[in-house]
Image: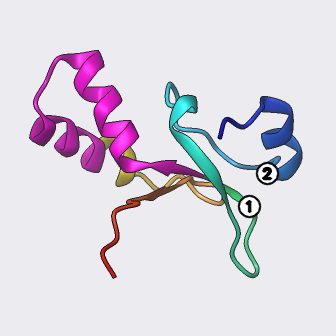
Amino acid sequence: MKFTKEYLQEAAPDAMKADGYDDCIVGIGYRCGSKAVLVYDIDMVVEKIMKRDGCSYDDALDFFEYNIGGAYVGDGTPLFMNRRFDP
């Protein structure tokens, strides 16, 4: 599902974005007592880094973990989820 800019602005007006990864947004996260945040799919972000930079999965994952997923920039910092789940 693609989220329109208008919907995201209305549902999560204070949410911060990971620049260049709008197509990796998979939802909006809510937590009691906190503002709504954007939720990104880690696999989609890593794949985009691989294609953009022409690097391996491991290098892209390292880049993601250090530069994107590991960054906390205050209220509204995005969440990054891993959708792999084997019950």
Residue 83 higher or lower than 38, as above or below: below
Q: Main secondary structure of the magenta part?
A: helix
Distance between mark 2 and mark 1 Cα atoms: 5 Å
What type is the residue that disc 2 sits on? Ala
- Percent across and percent down for residue 70 are 35, 54
What type is the residue that disc 1 sits on? Ala
Q: Are marks 2 and 1 in contact (CB under 8 Å)?
A: yes
Q: Is residue 75 left or right of residue 32?
A: left
Residue at the image point whose x is 38% and y is 38% from the top:
45
The image quarter containing residue 81 is bottom left
30 magenta-colored = no
54 magenta-colored = yes
The image quarter containing residue 59 is top left
Residue at the image point whose x is 51% and y is 48% from the top:
40
Q: Quadrant of the C terminus?
A: bottom left
- Percent across and percent down for residue 7 are 84, 40
Q: Which residue is mark 1?
A: 36
Q: Which residue is mark 2?
A: 12
For residue 66, the mark is none
- Percent across and percent down for residue 51 are 26, 20
Q: Is residue 30 left or right of residue 44?
A: right
For marks 2 and 1, the one nearer the N-term is 2
Task: Please report the bounds of the magenta region as a residue range.
Answer: 39-66
Residue at the image point whose x is 53% and y is 52% from the top:
73
Residue 72 higher or lower than 86, as above or below: above
